[in-house]
Image (cartoon, rainbow, N blue to C red):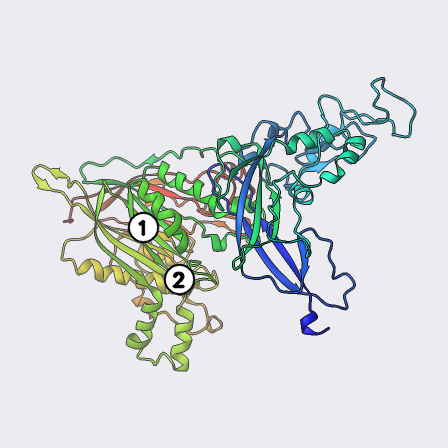
Amino acid sequence: MNSKDAMYSWHLSLRVDRPVEGCSIRPHAYMYGKKLDSNDPNHHSSNTHTKTSREPPPNHEFSYRWFRGPTVEPCAYEGCPRRTSFSPHDWSKHALGGSGCSLQCVSAQSSLYKATFCNSDCFVKAWKTQYTIQSSGSNSSDGSGNHGIPQARSSTPLRKRTGSYCDDDRSVGSQSTSGNDGNYIPATPGDSNSNNSSTTTMNNPYSAQLSNEDTEWIEISRDQLYIPHTDDIGRKLKVEASAYSVDTGELLMHRVVKTDLVLSRTPEPEKRNLVTAKPAGGGGARFRIVTYNILAEIYATQQQYPYADLWALSWDFRFQNIIREVVDVGPDIVCLQEVQADHYESHLYNAMHEAGFEGVYKQKTRQAMGMTGKVDGCALFWRRTKFHLVESYSIEFNELAQRQVTQGMGLNPRSEEGASILNKLSKDNVAQLVVLETAQPSMSRGNREPNQVCIANTHLYSNKDCPDVKLWQTLHLLQELETFIMARGPANLPLMICGDFNSTPDSAVYDLLSRQLVHPGHPDVNTGDENGPSVLPDIMSITHSHMLGSVYNTVLGEEPKFTNYTMQFKGVLDYMWYSTRNLRPLSAAPIPDESVLTRHGDALPSTQYSSDHLMQISDMQIVSGGSR
């Protein structure tokens, strides 16, 4: 075939996530072309979302329309809780027994014929109530004129099968190559397939239901983005995407898909009560601080968390839960990790600002993963009515590694040894450092109480096979903090170090933070040559001058059982450290029990907990002794 005789198939892909009240949803529309193989006898596709043309698809843009459908009963089994509840908890894979898809009875001889059930368990339970109906070939009649037409009991009314593909087949069709004159206006959902209506009415006892349903679809928006609200709960939505030529305005293709039922907002989580430490007299300003790894979207994949619903992993769903969880505990200082750069700009900063906070952000050193903003980092917020920002700095561990190789070790970074060490230490991790001052300084007996506090927020390297790299990062973070605090005079500045240290309580990182040193025999400092070049200094040099305590260990007497809870790992990785000379923990919120965490999922994230980590919460007080 000559190039001028080449044919192309055009394809329009359209997908939309499960809608949830208050969570914005955006259609994923994509139009593309494929050059057809003239030797392929099946190259003329009958797919309604495909058309053939002598040209590849031109530059195009999409327009959208959203429709709200009628109310439906989602399950024919009367005992199903999902007949009356649209909570995400009741519609998760965990609640549905792992299937996450509806079933329909296809036996024409059953009273359940064409009844739809939300999962196999409901179908099995309903099957116990079904009865056999004589086939259509029988001469029997029930006296109502319905010869051989299945009639269901009231407990299992007749239902048509629902699903996005069904709507797609009936209401979506791209124009054929001929007849696409540019004046075609896409039909609203339900307008197509009229040529089969008479046949359907004659042979299908559900035809009236089908027709009535289609007339109840109401157009609700023409924006690309749609945010479901209360009126949408329990209904399905349809979105129509129409591709138009940028140059001519000609309609190229269009497609309509139907969503799953709109779910309600996730119910509020159980309140986490604070355990109070032993009372002590005196003290200055008090503040509540939280630390939370919120799980960046770039890591929240179905491959990583196969037990979680895809829609429950979407950022728009998780963001609503996370921001509510953070704001509801009433913090004054918020340390967040795995904050995606684009989401900080588009979601997080605005939401926290509206809640009364100001903040700073530092993304990891590496480049974005494919697209602008697709890289995570750390965010630190403070309540505007409680604190003013005095100083703000960031620490890049890559820069510290470069400094150690060139200045500390005197190596050429391009030499084999220098490059090897840099390659091992340059993991793109960062830390934030702010000095905050109370907005209303405390006064006690006519003397000014200490009113400043230094907060560090970090996220260390995650690879479990590189404990020496994590220890190196911790040591250099502590050294940077030493230099920073000592530069501000002899008075000790209260210090808190919060974040995801990716280190368990038996690690060298924990020992260094809590004991100011590491035992020479610790496995983390004896990794062997197979772990690459040695990056740690002499064991006697792995120390610092900070006197630090763990908030949770101090208040509760031990670290939690876990702060990270997935199917692959359950353990403590997150900590809140404080300078014992001039800070006092007043309380801490225990991590929820496993029975609570697994109520709505096998592990985290789930429909209730939208990160794989758990937030830590504490009330702190600045202590006067030795402070400015």
Q: Nearer the viewer, residue 150 or 448?
A: 150
Against 396, is 624 above or below?
above
Q: Is residue 566 visible?
A: yes
The image quadrant that residue 329 belongs to is: top left
The amino acid type found where label 2 is placed reads Lys
Q: Residue furthest top?
A: 143
Mark 2 secondary-structure assignment: helix
Against 481, is 609 above or below?
above
Q: Nearer the viewer, residue 467 or 72?
A: 72
What residue is pinned by disc 2?
470
Q: Earlier in the sequence, mark 1 or mark 2?
A: 1
What residue is pinned by disc 1?
380
Q: How many discs appear?
A: 2
Left or right placement of residue 42 versus residue 361 in this view? right
Left or right placement of residue 140 versus residue 375 in this view? right
Please name the residue shown 34% across and 67% down the image: 539
For residue 320, the mark is none
Q: Nearer the viewer, residue 510 or 125?
A: 125
Left or right placement of residue 368 versus residue 555 in this view? right
